[in-house]
């Protein structure tokens, strides 16, 4: 009887190994980093045009990367729970630094002042 209970306890522990199932249309990590980099650029535009609706920009970014909004949200949740989002945002930051040399210089100057670069994760 003790062996039977032990087997059921082990089965119960191993059956609950994942908190979230892999989404049906999971976005690749590289594509996710590109989308996040473009979304960050779009977010900066909201500071320049504070009274404007920037939702069209977000839709354009997702459409240009051939990503559906629901797929983006589900993939985002999946990567957050799997603790892969920090690596994706670091890749997005590298993409942004490649696109803008002034940003690369700014981050490098801040790193020299503080000792380490500020992460993109909030």
Image (tube, rainbow, N blue to C red):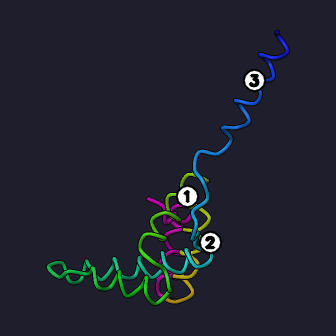
Q: Quadrant of the C terminus?
A: bottom left
Q: Residue at x 64, y 45 (%)?
A: 18
Q: Residue at x 54, y 80 (%)?
A: 34
In-front residue for pair 115/9: 9
Is 112 part of what is drawn in magenta? yes
Q: Nearer the viewer, mark 2 or mark 3?
A: 3
Task: Please name the residue that numbered disc 3 is placed on.
Answer: 8
- Give the distance between the C-alpha atoms of the residues marked 2 and 3, in whole angstroms: 37 Å
Q: Residue at x 37, y 88 (%)?
A: 60
In-front residue for pair 5/42: 5
Task: Please name the residue that numbered disc 2 is placed on.
Answer: 29
Label whose residue precedes the other's in the sequence (2 or 3): 3
Quarter holding residue 24: bottom right
- Give the distance between the C-alpha atoms of the residues marked 1 and 2, in whole angstroms: 11 Å
Is 121 part of what is drawn in magenta? yes
User: Quick one: SS at disc 2?
Assistant: helix
Q: Which mark is residue 78?
A: 1
Q: Nearer the viewer, mark 3 or mark 1?
A: 3
Judged from this view, the residue extending furthest toward the top is 1
Please state the horizontal and vertical placement of residue 73, each as a whole percent of the image: 45, 65
Q: Which residues are magenta?
A: 102-122
In the picture, measured across the screen, residue 29 lies left or right of residue 120, that is right
């Amino acid at each position: 009887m003790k062996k039977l209970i032990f087997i059921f306890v082990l089965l119960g522990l191993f059956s609950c190994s994942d908190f979230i199932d892999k989404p049906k249309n999971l976005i690749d990590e590289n594509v996710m980093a590109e989308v996040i980099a473009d979304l960050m650029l779009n977010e900066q535009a909201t500071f320049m045009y504070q009274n404007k609706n920037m939702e069209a920009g977000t839709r354009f970014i997702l459409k240009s990367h051939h990503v559906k909004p629901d797929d983006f949200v589900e993939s985002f949740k999946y990567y957050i729970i799997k603790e892969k989002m920090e690596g994706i945002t670091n890749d997005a930051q590298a993409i942004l630094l490649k696109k803008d040399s002034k940003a690369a210089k700014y981050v490098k100057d801040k790193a020299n002042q503080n000792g380490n670069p500020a992460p993109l994760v909030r």
